[in-house]
Amino acid sequence: MQDWKRQNEPNYMALVGAFKPAIDGSQDIRPVVAKEAMAMGLPIVTAYFMG
């Protein structure tokens, strides 16, 4: 997985995250995918509600 990630990171332009609450109402307030995108220096487009 790390090799694939290293090889393909330059192809990404942004993260578009359509986050929403789960059916039971639970939510993840710190999605790992958003943190990874920030670490890569990518712009992030998401809803006001993240999680």
Image (spheres, rainbow, N blue to C red):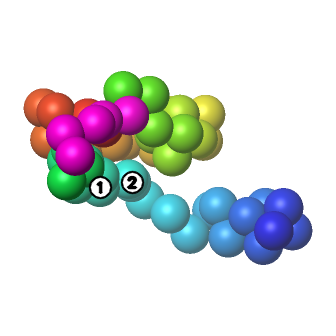
Residue tagged 1? 16
The quadrant of the image that shows the N terminus is bottom right
Q: Nearer the viewer, mark 1 or mark 2?
A: 1
Where is residue 46 shown, x and y percent of the image? 22, 44
Q: Is residue 14 above or below residue 11?
A: above
Extreme residue toward the top, this view: 29
The amino acid at mark 2 is Ala
Residue tagged 2? 14
Q: Which residues are magenta?
A: 24-28
- Can you tell which quarter of the image residue 36 is in? top right
Q: Is residue 32 magenta?
A: no
Where is residue 48 shown, x and y percent of the image? 12, 32
Where is residue 12 shown, x and y percent of the image? 50, 63
Where is residue 16 shown, x and y percent of the image? 29, 55
Q: Is residue 40 visible?
A: yes
Extreme residue toward the front, this view: 24
- Can you tell which quarter of the image residue 2 is in? bottom right
* Main SS of residues in magenta: loop
Q: Are marks 1 and 2 in contact (CB under 8 Å)?
A: yes
The amino acid at mark 1 is Val
Q: Is residue 22 above or below residue 39?
A: below
Residue at 54% across, 39% down? 32
Secondary structure beneath dot 1 equals: strand
Q: Which mark is residue 46?
A: none
Q: Around disc 1, counting alpha carbons within 10 Å, would you say few (fewer than 14), some (14 to 19), or many (20 or more)? A: few
Q: Measure the C-alpha gap from mark 1 to mark 2.
A: 6 Å
Residue at 73% across, 64% down? 5
